[in-house]
Image (tube, grey):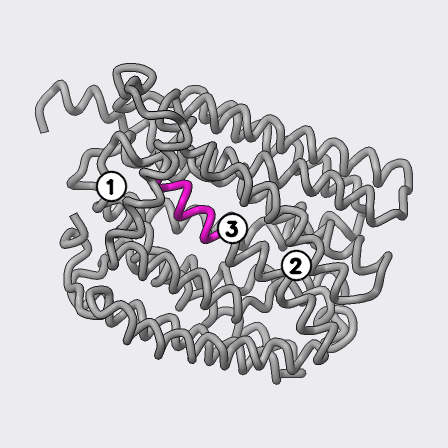
Amino acid sequence: MNQETTTLYRHRDFIVFLFGRFFMTTAMMAQSVAIGWQIYAMERTPLALGLVGLCQFLPMFLLTLPAGEISDRFDQRKVLSLALLLQSICGGLFLALSVAHIANAMAFYTVLVLFGAARGFSAPSGQSLLAFLVPPERLARSIALNSSVFTTAVIAGPALGGFLYALGPAATYSVCVVGFVGGSLCMLTLGGRRRSGPVSGEASRLERVAEGVRFVRERPVVFGAISLDLFAVLLGGATALLPVYARDILHVGPIGLGFLRSAPAAGAAVMALALARRPIEHRTGAKMFIAVAIFGVATIVFGLSKNFYLSMAALVVLGASDMISVFVRQALITYATPDEMRGRVGAVGMLFIGASNELGEFESGITAALFGTIPAVVLGGLGTLGIVALWMKLFPPLKTIDRLSDAA
């Protein structure tokens, strides 16, 4: 690597990016524990937990694609920093509602809509930024290290949220505000490779958004990986119902809920570290399908378990298998996407991920209200296995892809 490249890709920028990612993710996960526990305590119905996901999904669905186009036009660092600042304002509003002892779920849902809008802008800018901070030859390992830091935060966040909630929700939300502000400041200081300026051209913003969607749709390897993750997690996501398991099935309280929320991330963190040391080099597609199938089986085991330790073990396996899918998806998107489209393509990917997570929470709440909590989780796991079988038929190029770099 020559001197100019060494100066362009400063090691310091990647480290600061990881710290910022850790701060904002820890804050978001801690906040989710407090919100889930508060709203379930108010309403005592799984449907109320499902609405938590829906309130975040709707604004994300509407704003993520336009936000991706904005990230391609302007500096992603500033877009991400402003979005995190808005998330800190939402944390402050949750804090105010808790200090005022507002026991009205609708007030929390309203703030969640604003929080979902902020996430709609932060997701594509954050997704596209890593490729501008590290050289191409270090990209695969950097993706794995970034995933490792992310999952470490997903472990620490719920555990921190659970312990702080024992002191009261105000303690949790106060720490979350600090985390979001810290993440915002980190993103403002980043250097790395930059585009020459705002993207110009005759295409309208709507046409540029459509171009990003078309780019993903016309590449079966990328589209197959993204949609597989969407439907697998949409059907197999059990995390939305963890407050029900913690309170009514496993009887472990808010601290136990924090551990349950952290268990998938613990498995994911171990797998991410393993992938950072030895990234997947061959039979990438086949290994992704195997991992998603294991995710479905682990979901079924968790759904049927009434033992806290078995439930924790199932969630650890669930998180480890999901990390393989996340790593492959992120790497395929990164390798396949040119610089001028990273924001828009990242927005499409994050829209699918947001749908699988937040809309999956709503789906879990609906099915649990209709069929009961345990049957809903088990049916979701079985649905994930069905999706794996169907996607292997629909996307043969994804099943047969060998190296990650082949996506380019």
**Which residue is labeled 1 in the image?**
337
- Residue 77, given in percent of the width and then of the height, sits at 42, 24
By secondary structure, the bulk of the magenta-drawn segment is best described as helix
Q: Is residue 174 left or right of residue 394?
A: right
Q: Is residue 236 left or right of residue 213?
A: right
- Residue 53, given in percent of the width and then of the height, sits at 64, 54
SS at badge 2: helix
Q: Compared to 278, does 62 lie above or below?
A: above
Residue type indicated by callout 3: Gly
Magenta segment includes 352: yes
The residue mark sitting in front, 2 or 3, is: 3
Q: Quadrant of the N terminus?
A: top left
Which residue does the image show at 51% across and 48% down from the upper left? Answer: 153
Dot placed on the residue nearer the N-terminal end, 2 or 3: 2
Using the numbered discs, state the Cα–Cα distance from disc 3 to disc 1 in whole angstroms.
20 Å
- Residue 195, given in percent of the width and then of the height, sits at 27, 20
Q: Which mark is residue 258?
A: 2
Q: Quadrant of residue 358?
A: bottom right
Classed neighbour count for the residue bearing mark 2: other residues with Cα under 10 Å, few (<14), some (14–19), many (≥20)? many
Q: Compared to 168, does 290 lie above or below?
A: below
Using the numbered discs, state the Cα–Cα distance from disc 1 to disc 2 in whole angstroms.
37 Å
The residue mark sitting in front, 1 or 2, is: 1
Residue interval drawn in magenta: 345-353
Q: Nearer the viewer, residue 141 or 277?
A: 141
Q: Quadrant of residue 188?
A: top left
SS at badge 3: helix
**Which residue is labeled 3 in the image?**
354
